[in-house]
Amino acid sequence: MDAAVAAAAEARERLRASFASGRTRPAAWREAQLRGLLRMAAEMEDDICAALRADLAKPQTESYVHEVYTDPSIISCV
């Protein structure tokens, strides 16, 4: 087994052990975090676009499409 495959297998086992220990957050908590992120992006859209304009000279439409807008249906994947 080459070193990269062995390292990936070891990482996978560490992650599985961590999950099995209960250290990770429940799916409901993760979904609430995603919903909060979507709400924040919608509420702060103008501020985010203004900051991108000031820092990177990024036009509003480009900022919205590439940085702000997120399809709410992604939450249904949880």
Image (cartoon, helix red, strand yellow):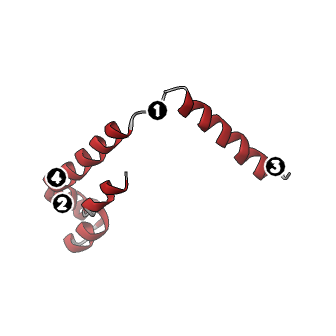
Q: Are marks 1 and 2 in contact (CB under 8 Å)?
A: no
Hey, what amino acid is under mark 4? Answer: Met
Hey, what amino acid is under mark 1? Answer: Thr
Say which of marks 1 and 4 sits in front: 1
What crowding class fits label 4: few (fewer than 14 Cα within 10 Å), some (14-19), or many (20 or more)? few
Say which of marks 3 and 2 sits in front: 3
In the picture, residue 12 is in which quadrant? top right
Give how far apart the Cα atoms at labels 1 and 2 are. Answer: 35 Å
Q: Secondary structure at mark 3?
A: helix
Q: Is residue 32 above or below residue 65?
A: above
Q: Is residue 45 above or below residue 20?
A: below
What crowding class fits label 2: few (fewer than 14 Cα within 10 Å), some (14-19), or many (20 or more)? some
The mark found on residue 50 in the picture is: 2
Q: Position of residue 5 (x, y in %)?
A: 77, 52
Most foreground residue, 60 or 39: 39
The mark found on residue 44 in the picture is: 4
What crowding class fits label 1: few (fewer than 14 Cα within 10 Å), some (14-19), or many (20 or more)? few
